[in-house]
Image: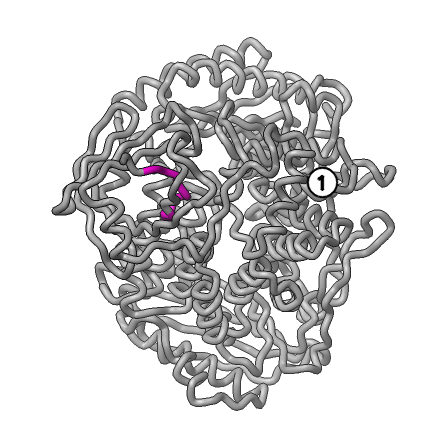
Amino acid sequence: MAQEGFKRKLAAILSADVEGYSRLMGDDEEVTVRTITSYRTAIADLVQQFRGRVVDSPGDNILAEFTSVVDAVNCAVQIQRDLAELNAELPDERKMQFRIGINLGDVIDEEERIYGDGVNIAARIESLSDSGGICISHSAYDQIKNKLKLGYEYLGEHEVKNIREPVKVYRVLMAPEFEGKLIGVEKKTSKSRWFGMVAAAVVIIFGIVLWQFYQNKPIPSDKKTSAEKPSIAILPFTNMSNDPEQEYFSDGLTDELIGDLAKISGILVISRNSAFTYKGKQVKISQVAKELNVRYVLEGSVQKSGDKVRIRAQLIDGETDHHLWSESYDGVLKDIFDLQDKITGKIVSALAVKLSPSEQKRVADKGTDNVLAYEVFLKGGEHLVKLTPEDFLKAIEYYKKAIKFDPNFSRAYAAIGGMYQYGSNLGWSSKMGIDSGTMRLRSRHYLELAMKNPSPEAYSLASAIEMHRRNFQKAITLAEKAYNYAPNSAGAITSLGWKLAFTDRTEESIELLNKAIRLDPLDTQLYTSHNFIWIGVCHFSMGNLEEAVTYLEKGLSLNPKLNNLSCFLAASHALLGHDIEAKKALAEYLKIFPKGFPVTIQLIYYAWPFKDSEVFDRLAQGIVKAGLPGDPAEYYKLNSQEKLNGQEIKKLLFGKTSTGYVFGIRALEWISHINDDGEEEFSFRGKTYTGKAWIENENIYLLREQYLGGLKQCIEIYRNPEGDELTKTEYFRVTDYGFFLFSVEK
């Protein structure tokens, strides 16, 4: 008798969900439910129209199947186009945007439901999609690549939980100009073609990234032998608890051990981002050691049940595969700091590294002695590393809980401030439900709380804020404090490295950035992609435009989401006479601005704090040559010699009315009147806000009710000798969220 089994079939699976659904529900449940009900009906109608079937639609998710990939993708494109029209009628904060993932795979069909890897892969691909976008698997791409009037961008390979092999992912490009194009896959082409989007950007050989050849010239590497100092990689500890929700604890412990060793100058420790590329994989230790170019590898497991913790760890020589030691540590949760210190001490002893007294103190410093705060902090870290707006919001909530347990937990305050700063830089304000200016002020607010008990994270954040204000020496000093605290932290090294790039210390910057790449060779989303770009900026600053293009394209190919930095690539190509490539790079850069927004050289000047004005002049010339309207010489420069002190600011502004245009746009006029007692009335876009002004530390501080979150603003004032009263450009207001030109009514 034949054995009966599940019915299987090959299907094109479409998975969709709403980005930011929790925020929408939190803002207005009734409106959100009405909107999603309407949108779900529209999607179901389209699925039926394209010969598909809606399998399930719980919450904000929709799962559908098709017999044809062509039908599935055509349906997805029509869904996004129709929803875009519906969203156009809604205010920004109420727009409901779906992400769609499509996979062709084998599924189990049981009672009108479908299950299996094919469904799981579609859901994973969906999570990689942008809001309003579509991503597809390689199996789906192969079926449609020459059949539809669409373009595609290769996004590389991505891990899928419980799927052995990584999945290749493509973004569907729906704009007509991309029809028939494939971006991101290496092709043989002439030197004048666009090389920035190259797939398979990273090939791991002998522990470092073997840089792809670009225009027949390899990117120089900074490979160092493991003999220089003891080198180690800490692999993600395995969660042996019965509860998968405890994954944050095993991952967090791994992070903390890496962080502890990064504080020791005598050890080279691979960054978290590269170490975690091995998470969930069965790999030989010798292979890990070879790919990361390290001598030693630490692996282990964590079992947490209630307040009981068991940690097993073993240190292995990657060259000989010899186990140097293997230990088991048992304790309760309140002993976690001691257990962590025991493991770190065992590693240091095995590697024969002697710690200085200051290093011993730094390693012992966990930022808090409150176990509950620490545990919640680790939960926040689980979301922070995912680098999405939704996960940032979740991480912030966990960090706030950590602060409730320990109000002096500087690392938690700094983490919140850093996420607001980083989110604002990437243009995530609408996705996080907060305007960009408020995000910047929240960043400063949490920084001030963090600096009451400074941590390396607080120093790095403070350094970034001061850098954008053009307080160059202060920024460097703060970045050096973070670096000196953790000299082998890829994050601290990157923080100092990019600031040196903008202060005309390019050789030092390149050396540091290469060191950061050495510590994080497999990362594509955070430090390494940034570091290639910053090295490119260094070469741009030195006038080495060919080298600048090579590094900039490398960084942007690793992480195309960093298009806020593609202005440097546009300028480099333009100055080299690569007109087509320059226009493409400029188009990528302009995507970070709202459609129709008047981008000017003055606005771009605010974003990039070059100490040497000649470097920004070069950037301005290149961007205009790439196609940005305007005169590259028509912008006002900040001169440190023109900064007003507190007494001069009070004389200028108190008892007076000042007025200006935001970004020089006359429709965005603002007016501020401060009386002699510091009471302020501020008018902008038809609304008037009241507040208080005072002088402190040679700056003016403002606190306005119901404007920018009601948060305190620190403002520096500079004269602008080249400005005039007619255009309201006689002075600069330097804030955390931008520079604003203004004049004072006579």
Residue 136 image point, x, y percent: 63, 31
Q: Which residue is mark 1?
A: 197
Q: Is residue 280 left or right of residue 330?
A: right
**Callout 1 amino acid:** Met
Q: Residue at x 56, y 41 (%)?
A: 564
Q: Residue at x 26, y 26 (%)?
A: 29
In the image, is residue 742 part of the stretch drawn in magenta?
A: yes
Quadrant for the C terminus in the image? top left
Dot 1: element: loop
The crowd level at tag 1 (other Cα within 10 Å; few <14, some 14-19, many 20+) is many
| Residue 570 appears in the figure | yes
In the image, is residue 603 part of the stretch drawn in magenta?
A: no
Q: Residue at x 31, y 63 (%)?
A: 450
Residue 283 image point, x, y percent: 66, 63
Stretch in magenta: 734-743
| Residue 119 appears in the figure | no
Q: Nearer the viewer, residue 528 or 277?
A: 528
Q: Nearer the viewer, residue 657 or 629?
A: 657
Q: Nearer the viewer, residue 552 or 86?
A: 552
